Image (cartoon, rainbow, N blue to C red):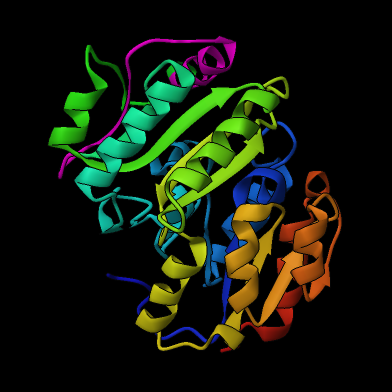
Amino acid sequence: MKTAKNQLRHLYISDLDGTLLCPRGTLSRFSREQLTKMLSEGLPFTVATARSLESVRVILKGLPLRLPVIHFNGAMISDFSTGQHFSVLSFEQSLAQLVAEFTISRMGHWPYVSSFDGEHDHLSYEDIPNLGYDWYVKERVKSKDPRLRQVPRVDKILDEESTICFTVVSGFDVLNVFRQQLEQQFPNRLRIRFFQNPYDRDWYWITIQPYAATKATAIKRLLQEQRMSAQDLTVFGDHCNDQEMFEIAGRAIAVANAIEELRALSTHQIGHHGDDSVVEFIRQDWQLIRPRD
């Protein structure tokens, strides 16, 4: 895995939605300008997100990100500019089959499947069971996501490709019951994340991944590559999928809109994500610690 030419002395890693991005799910003009300036000066910064690399590359297009990007909640580590994957954490095929079959038996439809065929990433689905999925597909179409494809049989995908993530969308009550059923059926075998869609709040999502898929797992690999300690790490987040990286970082910084559980783990708290608080914190901190000629 290629990172920066020189060993880093510090590393900043931010979540995207609800943290670095503004409430519309985009990078504000101020944050884009400041990050571009600081990255050109050598700012050691990257992101760790639940989004796919394709989504990250659309949102952060134009940023000179040199460090690898952590996506799919740590299941993948990739080069931002080329899209090359350095690390892929996928399901064992037998477990992927069991989870998919369990989903269709409880939910009445196959989950959406994020996968990797060795060369290309895919987001596969058979049909659109409700308006929550409809929003998801339309957003991927709008962003011209090349991964998106409708397939006649999802189970065939599970046989032929590495499964990275399952996504299930429904109302709160239905998904809450399904989450409990998953936990009972597959104890300590899955990383299950249950959350409200921040951009279409009528719908809730469950993402299902291998148990080892966490942002912290991927971050530890980056730290090892750079021969750095977790004490040299500053992370920013807002939600439950940031918990593991908050637990390992020297500085764990929660935005004002973060959930209470994450704020309790934080070492610092800053303003709301809609106020460019992450980039403003980095801008001031970077002035203090950046190497001088």
| 31 versus 222 height, above or below | above
Q: Position of residue 212 (x, y in %)?
A: 40, 62
| 74 versus 231 height, above or below | above
Q: Position of residue 65 (x, y in %)?
A: 46, 58
Is 138 a magenta residue? yes
| Observer able to see residue 141 | yes
Q: Position of residue 138 (x, y in %)?
A: 50, 14
Is 120 a magenta residue? yes
Left or right: residue 46 compared with residue 279: left
Which residue is at the front of the view, 230 or 183? Answer: 183
Left or right: residue 176 compared with residue 88: right
Quarter of the picture containing the N terminus is bottom left
Number of numbered discs present? 0
Residue at position x 64%, y 33% in the image: 176
Which residue is at the front of the view, 230 or 126? Answer: 126
| 80 versus 262 height, above or below | above
- Please report the bounds of the magenta region as a residue range: 117-140
Left or right: residue 191 compared with residue 176: left
Name the residue at the front extreme.
184
